[in-house]
Amino acid sequence: MTESGTQLKAAPVNGTPVEGIVKRQASVITWVASRGIFIFTGVLLVFSVIFVNGFASSVNIIDVFHRASAIGIVAIGMTFVVISANYIDLSVVAQVATAGVILLALSPTYGVLGAMAIALFFALLYGVVNGVSVGFLKANAVVVTLGTTGIGAGILSLLTTGTIYYGPENGPIDAFGDARVGPFPLSAFVLILVAVIASIVLSRTKFGFMIRSYGSNKQATRLAGVNSGGVVVGAFVLTSIAAMIAGFVLAAYSNTAVATMSEGFDFRALAAVIIGGNSLFGGRGSILRTFLGVIFISVLSNILVLSGFSFAWQQLVTGAVIVFAVALDALARKAEKR
Amino acid sequence: MTTAPETHTTRKTVIEAHDIVKRFGGAVAVDHVSIAVGAGEIHAVVGENGAGKSTLMRILAGILTPDNGGVSVDGIVLEPGAKASLEAGIALVHQELSLIPEMTVAENILLGSTPTKFGAIDSARQRKIAADALDQIGVSVDLNERVSRLSVALRQFVEIARAVARSPRVLILDEPTATLTPAETDYLLNMLQRLAAKGLAIIYISHRIPEVFRICERATILRDGKVVDNLIIADTTPNAIIDKMVGRELKLDLQTRRIANPGAVVLSARGIRAFRVNGIDLDVRAGEIVGIGGLVGAGRSELVRAIIGVDPRTAGTATITVDGQTKNIVGYRSAVRAGIGFVPEERRTEGLALEMSVADNITLPNRAALSKAGFLQRGKITEFATRLAAEVGLRPPEVGRDAGQYSGGNQQKVVIAKWLGREPKLIVLDEPTRGVDVGAKAEIHRLLRGLADGGTAVLVISSDLPELLELSDVIHVVRDGRIMGTLSPDEANERSVMALAAGEKVASSS
């Protein structure tokens, strides 16, 4: 792989001088924007292991993974929408809760698989409604997904009226939530599996390519004969499926589900995507980045908790990191425009 | 030629830039450039795209600060910054129009120096200054008209009035005639000569060598950020200047006219109406290059975009016939599926994803063929892109590099390569060589001729008259959304095309 910063020593072709390449050198800002998350995550982990008491204990590591898995799965799904053209999906909050509540409330009647199928139906509904509104009707993604959040969360509260659903003790859902492989909870493996599959879809499939291409230049992609509206729908559907899986994982972890179980997931998932260095301008990014972004914010909140800082401090620090990441992205874009 | 121009030594130097160096990152955009322009002189700055012309002009206007060297006016070295340059009397007429469409002509001319009285806008004075500026350049336009209602040419003139209103000592124009018709260009060139006669120092950047020969006294030729030569126009020839710009002897592609051998009709459009298109019939045959001429704003782009379904049409039908089967073109995707390729006018915004690799761009319309069960086949993609990059002569042929890193000519080759991979039955090109350097232009022309010789139907829109004349087997001239006339190669020349485009009666004895 060549870096954009390398100076090209172009070999003459057929004896004619070569003037084809516009020379460009990466600045410190573009370098940090593109590589920073790898360094920052590494530094944070080393720092936490050495300086934060109790961080490296197996109990704590399990806890970090538990907290990271649901939010991480949502963030990985959200990456598709962000890369597809700087859209965001705020309705993941309602989607996670919908899936979690359906799983626990309906599995006694329809069985676990039956409940999952019903949850999948609603996930697809969310994805298609969001995707068609944004991709074909060209509505603003923030407004549309705010609207569908309201509709979805509203229906959920009306139907559940604040009920907290519990899964049967030692049922399959409870067993999944408690299961360990070595010191790691199963949810951590779900997170890694989702990340691997999502990464393959984004980087190796035709559909993933269309998403990246559309995010990089909508008009050029449309003029290449691509069904661009369909690409957007696909991105929203993938986000919805990820949110559904996150809902299952979250419900299984505590074996409970309630309409308000996923509050703040929109903000935290988006934070992970942005902190990972995925460009909010679309086109650029990877699942690995989002994964590292999730690890970064999860570890950060964990060490703040371990060091005795309140929730307010966690909020403040996460917010500051997001502003830093977004500003870095914007500055890098500016620096590249010469 | 008018009276022989005085040599620059007799002129009093107004603006002088000394040993200017400007780097962007590691790339040197302007490399130890010095330039001096005297009062009353029109000085050409020429060079290929990327030679550093626009960067140099932005340094002269104080928009960019050089890494080395400085700019002086009347021997006084300027402080850095656009404000100091403006106060010293340097006015830059931008390449991209920088007027505000929703504001009036008078407001635009005084933009940035709006006169006030007790804090309120002094509209009487504003109108007076604007009217004086327009008088000076000899253009009459209603001061209260909103700029959005003006033609492209009038906007260009308002832009110049805006510079003149500041009573500059130095006027810099960057490709001012790019969007003008010959008559408008003529008017502009005369205007500049009048302004120079009043003692203004004018720096004139242009690709168009004939214009340089008509009005300029000297020319500074830039290549790769360096001054290659500084010539007195009266002592040189257009070919000598072009050779120096390109840095190699350019073998002009004066091959004999291609013998067109048109086959069956591939594209057939009937009664097309759309925004700016008022009922057009058009046929393109296999192996034929059909040219669409006309002025900017005549509805040429709108016409082809409506035919192939990029933009909606309000009436009319278009069909494409491949292997004896005729299909209706109902939308753009159906057009692409039926074998149409489209190279849009705006390369950077519509043609390419600049941050993606050349390979990704080239294979974008061909993904289905290059993936198996939805998974991309990387080896095949690279091989495919490399083959097409070689076919269009991409230099250097590194398909892993971002498209945005290539120069304009190479980028355009990538856009064309994208469609070649599909072996299109019809390829539509809107301004195929705009902003492309001379060498790449010749290569693109050769490519299009080759396509037509191979039986592809080619439809080309071009504002570049020599290009249109050189390429086309038949030229339709569009004005006001209608075809005003159709010219065979024997009938077509710059005069006959422009006569139709500008709406004059065609003189039958041409």
Image (cartoon, coloured by chain):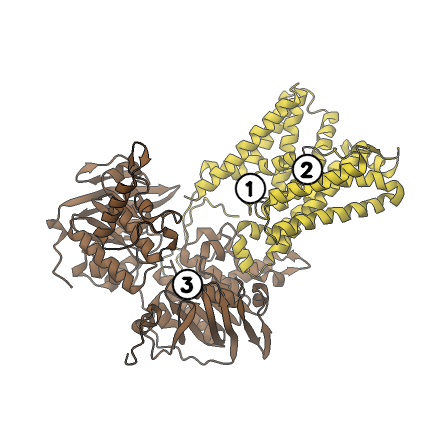
Disc 1: which residue: A280
- Element carrying mark 2: helix
Q: Chain of mark 3?
A: B
Q: Nearer the viewer, mark 2 or mark 1?
A: 1
Q: Chain of mark 2?
A: A
Measure the alpha-carbon separation of dots 2 and 3: 47 Å
Q: Nearer the viewer, mark 2 or mark 3?
A: 3
Measure the alpha-carbon separation of dots 2 and 1: 18 Å
- Element carrying mark 3: loop
Q: Residue at x 13, y 57 (%)?
A: B5
Q: Are marks 2 and 3 in contact (CB under 8 Å)?
A: no
Q: Are marks 2 and 1 in contact (CB under 8 Å)?
A: no
Q: Position of residue B486 (x, y in %)?
A: 39, 76
Measure the alpha-carbon separation of dots 3 and 1: 32 Å
Closer-to-camera residue (B219/A320): A320
Q: Residue at x 35, y 77 (%)?
A: B256
In the displayed orientation, state which residue is furthest to the front.
B124
Closer-to-camera residue (B406/A80): A80
Closer-to-camera residue (B12/A194): B12
State which chain is coloured brown: B
Res B75 → quadrant: top left
Q: Amino acid at mark 3?
A: Glu
Q: Amino acid at mark 2?
A: Gly
Q: Chain of mark 1?
A: A
Q: Amino acid at mark 1?
A: Leu
Q: Colour of chain A?
A: yellow
Q: Is residue B32 above or below residue B116?
A: below
Residue B37 in view of the camera: yes
